[in-house]
Amino acid sequence: MTGASVGLVTAAATLGALAGLAAPRIARAFPPSASPRPSPAGHGASRPARESGHGAPPVVVGAVVCGGLAAARGPEPALPAFLLVAAVGVVLAVVDLASLRLPDPLVGAAALGGGTALTVAAVAAGTPGRLALALAGAALSLLLYVVLALLPRSRLGFGDVKLAAVLGLPLGWLGWPALWLGLLLPHLLNGVLVLALLAAGRVRRDTALPFGPALLTGAWLAALLA
């Protein structure tokens, strides 16, 4: 890795660490939802899972997420868009874990920042077709998640739907394989996590669990592998 690459990764990791540092304070501004996601068993209001205090600190997670993107993508024109979405995504993950919410102001910030940065990247690189792919990715993600959210006994909220559409922008920019992988991975990751928590007795079938972190992790892995 060259000195310039090390500098880029260090700067990106610092951005992610700052987002992780701010995340808990921002999360306190969004109290738990008054109406948690419904139970798949249909037992009315489900019991939300609370933070247990375990897991990597948000500062470390943010540094790994943004530093990893910079290392994988390099100094390409779209990197600022990926880093903006990732930094806001770190905050969204912490908020969703704490309160089962994906607040519109934060999702909107990711959409505005990512969309603007991708537009600048497309103009700078002279690749308007990539921007069209990004918009198509967002539209397809929105459509698929609306359908999933409307299915009987679905546990997806419309915050998840909006976030999926936002993540479809950078994934669409990367192309169809990355988009499909980013749409599939969250469900695989969430399924494995739920089974593990059930087996460990940490949750019950009617425990409401956040899906935002799985969406964000799946999109991040897809971007790394693209």
Image (cartoon, rainbow, N blue to C red):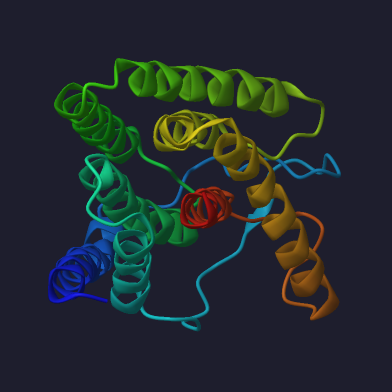
Left or right of 202 on screen, residue 219 = left
Is 116 above or below relative to 77?
A: above
Residue 198 visible, this orientation:
yes
Left or right of 26 on screen, residue 156 = right
Residue 30 visible, this orientation:
no
Is 106 above or below relative to 1?
A: above
- The residue at the point 29 percent across, 38 percent down is 110
Q: Position of residue 134 (x, y in %)?
A: 41, 25
In-front residue for pair 100/83? 83
Q: Position of residue 83 (x, y in %)?
A: 27, 51
Q: How many marks?
A: 0
- The residue at the point 47 percent across, 45 percent down is 33
Left or right of 46 on screen, residue 11 = left
In-front residue for pair 114/155? 114
Identify the residue at the far front of this view.
Answer: 2
Q: Quadrant of the N terminus?
A: bottom left
- The residue at the point 58 percent across, 43 percent down is 182
Q: Position of residue 163 (x, y in %)?
A: 45, 36
- The residue at the point 63 percent across, 56 percent down is 209
In-front residue for pair 148/68? 68
Q: Quadrant of residue 196?
A: bottom right
Is 215 above or below relative to 209?
A: above
